[in-house]
Amino acid sequence: MPAYRSHRFLFLTLLFGGCLFDGHEHPLWAGNLEIVTFNENITPKLGMPVAYAPARKILTPLYARGVVILSDEKPVVLCAVDAIGIGNQGYDTWREKLAEAAATTPDRVAVHSLHQHDAPRIDFATGKIMEDQGLGGKNYDNSYGRQCITQVANAIRSGLKSPQTVTHFGIGNAKVEQVASNRRLLGADGKVRLMRWSKSKSPDAINAPEGVIDPWLKCLCFWNQDHPIAVLNYYATHPQSYYGKGDVNYEFTGMAREARNKALPGTLNVYFNGAAGNIAAGKYNDGSTKMRPILAQRVERGMESAFNHQEKTEISSADLHWKTEMTALPVSRHLDPEALQETINDPEKTAKERASAAFRLVWYQRASQGHQIPITCLRLKSASILHLPGELFIEYQLQAQKFAPKQSVCLAAYGDYGPGYICTEIAYSQGGYESSPRASQVAPHVESVLTEVIRRLVMPEENSKK
């Protein structure tokens, strides 16, 4: 019997059958926390579709990595994937299969893409539409996506045979300098006057202030006594330095992550991208090849500093709590299912145009039928980890922190990629790319819906009832 199941059996035995003691005042088993790490190479083959072009080179491997946390509750799975996005049915299937492997339920599985722009898209429903149009493998490769899931699920099953005990938990944070900047530069009229993308050579864009960002990188560390087992890192920025030619790589945030793995042998570093929908490196990145390692070093320094300055305390199973809010996001009015279907069926349109229409149609159909996305929060000691969908604006992350100022609130966005950009309500009247019909698939009042869900998830119970 796997260790986590035997622990749960013993826990129930003690709970319902009376406590067993070792001759002292403590029970034989006091509710230890355990953890399983997994790290699977999911690099696509040459010729397979990645974000904007077929893969022509493999500059770095791609990974799906994370942890399974075992406690008195059902297991929790946290998974970060080197992919531009995992959406709709693809997102559902990832969670369902990983839940099955970990003997838990899908609502206790958080899967997040890291949004590198030379990495694959995974969306089985959209991929199936493309296959039916004779365009299989052009923008989506469903067989590749399913193989990724199988690999990760098998890794979880294997890891559960030998989980590691967690005795301590560390929380650290550090500022990252000269990486993040807000993409939306507003004019005196309150409208977007200039988009500052992931790279910029415009003096105006470079000289403008960073704008609203979250400069803090947070790390959460699981320890077995003096050995760090796994470090979860959270920071918010689009991870692109340069991209779009099909040169597969995990970008500068991935480089920072791998550098920390080398610095901490035997410890798995996992990176999650925060609410980076309107955040990128454009103020500090000119798109030259030399800037990728420079940006990576800046993020790596933040990871190292957060790890070195963490506060480490004992932890047990009783310190873990999971909350789920099933949430239906409002559908944008600009989505026209008949027009989208016409585009899909039009052989004169490019494969990219037809794939884009298919992606929007899949989201429209799911959302208009009331499909709910799990928005979840994992509480570990004084840390709260929020898991949210889409390309979320940084304001959501900052608001979550305000709701619980005495907690270390971490946020992983880019869960279900189906909604596209999730902006603040005012952004839909300001112009700019993110709030345009080609980028966002949700209605402006999405802010009020999500903000209330976030409040309920992160606020202490006594305050949330006021």
Image: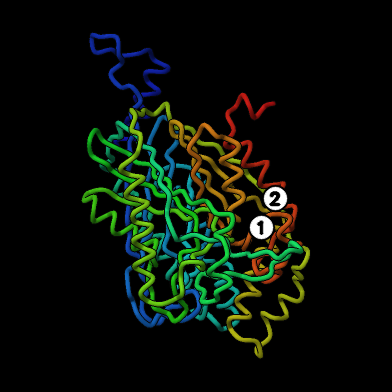
Q: Secondary structure at mark 2?
A: helix
Q: Amino acid at mark 2?
A: Glu
Spot occupied by residue 441 in the image (x, y as percentages of width and height) = 68, 63
Q: Answer whether residue 89 is visible to the viewer in this image.
A: no
Residue appearing at x 50%, y 78% in the figure: 52
- Tell me if label 1 and label 2 are in contact, CB under 8 Å: yes
How many C-alpha atoms fall within 10 Å of the one at disc 1: few (<14), some, or many (≥20)?
A: many
245 to the left or right of 22? right
Q: Which residue is mark 1?
A: 423
Q: Amino acid at mark 1?
A: Cys
The residue lying toward the viewer, choosing from 84 and 339, is 84
Mark 1 vs mark 2, CA separation in Å? 7 Å
Q: Quadrant of residue 340?
A: bottom right
Which residue reaches farthest bottom?
A: 348
Residue appearing at x 35%, y 34% in the figure: 311
218 to the left or right of 162? right
Residue appearing at x 70%, y 64% in the figure: 364
Spot occupied by residue 28 in the image (x, y as percentages of width and height) = 28, 18
Q: Which residue is mark 2?
A: 447
The residue lying toward the viewer, choosing from 92 and 299, is 299
Q: How is the image coloured?
A: rainbow
Q: Quadrant of residue 185?
A: bottom right
Spot occupied by residue 112 in the image (x, y as percentages of width and height) = 48, 55
Q: Secondary structure at mark 1?
A: loop
